[in-house]
Image: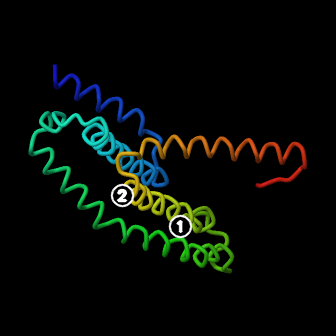
Amino acid sequence: MLSYLFDLGNKITEEKTKGTNVYHLLQYVWLIELYYLMLNSLSLFIVQVLEIKEFTELIPSIIIKYNDNTMNLFQLWSPFILIFGIGMFVSSVFVTMSKYILFTKNSGIVLYHADAGKFFSKWLLIISLTYYVYTWTGKFLPLVMILLALLTQALNKIRNMLEDKYHITFR
């Protein structure tokens, strides 16, 4: 039965990632990080806010050890990922100019991918900042996600109203 579930999981994963390319990789990394931090946040909420101390007894000590190690890795690597993301963004400004150099301007790869650093830097910054938001909010990370979704919806409504009523565009 367990092998059937693993096979089914592998088939679903394979089907979902068929069209994946390098541009999707950092988005998947962010989603994995977000799920991981969300689970830790919910665990903190259960123990600290709901005061269900027995919850920690349900988690095997080896899982707690691996979780501590994983959280230490987040703490260790987040500053580097933040600096790397900023550096990638600044570098992308200059690398994008390679699209206009005489001997590279007709190269399809350079033309289509020279500005990839802007895309990658955005996701590196999101990955790093997600961990910092978690360290700041801890057990309230789900609330932050709800507030960000509501803020995004409100900003979209304001933008649409400004475009419709005053013909101000933001594109």
Question: What scheme was used to colour the molecule?
Answer: rainbow
Task: Choose top left, top right, bottom left or bottom right for residue 3.
Answer: top left
- Residue at 71% over, 44% down: 156
- Residue at 29% over, 45% down: 40
Mark seen at residue 95: none
Q: Earlier in the sequence, mark 1 or mark 2?
A: 1
Coordinates of residue 129 in the picture (x, y in percent): 44, 60
Tell me the amino acid under the disc marked 2. Answer: Thr
Mark 1: which secondary structure? helix
- Callout 1–callout 2 Cβ contact below 8 Å: no
Residue 43 is left or right of residue 22, and the answer is: left
Mark seen at residue 117: 1
Choose between 117 and 36: the one closer to the eye: 36
Choose between 26 and 34: the one closer to the eye: 34
Q: Nearer the viewer, mark 1 or mark 2?
A: 2
- Residue at 41% over, 51% down: 30
The quadrant the C terminus occupies is bottom right
Choose between 25 and 166: the one closer to the eye: 166
Badge 2: how crowded within 10 Å, few (<14), some, or many (20+)?
some
Coordinates of residue 67 in the picture (x, y in percent): 20, 50
Coordinates of residue 1 in the picture (x, y in percent): 16, 19
Say if 128 sits above or below 4 in the image.
below
In this figure, what is the number of numbered marks?
Answer: 2
Question: Which residue is farthest right?
Answer: 166
Say if 137 sits above or below 83 in the image.
above
Tell me the amino acid under the disc marked 1. Answer: Gly
Q: Which residue is mark 2?
A: 135
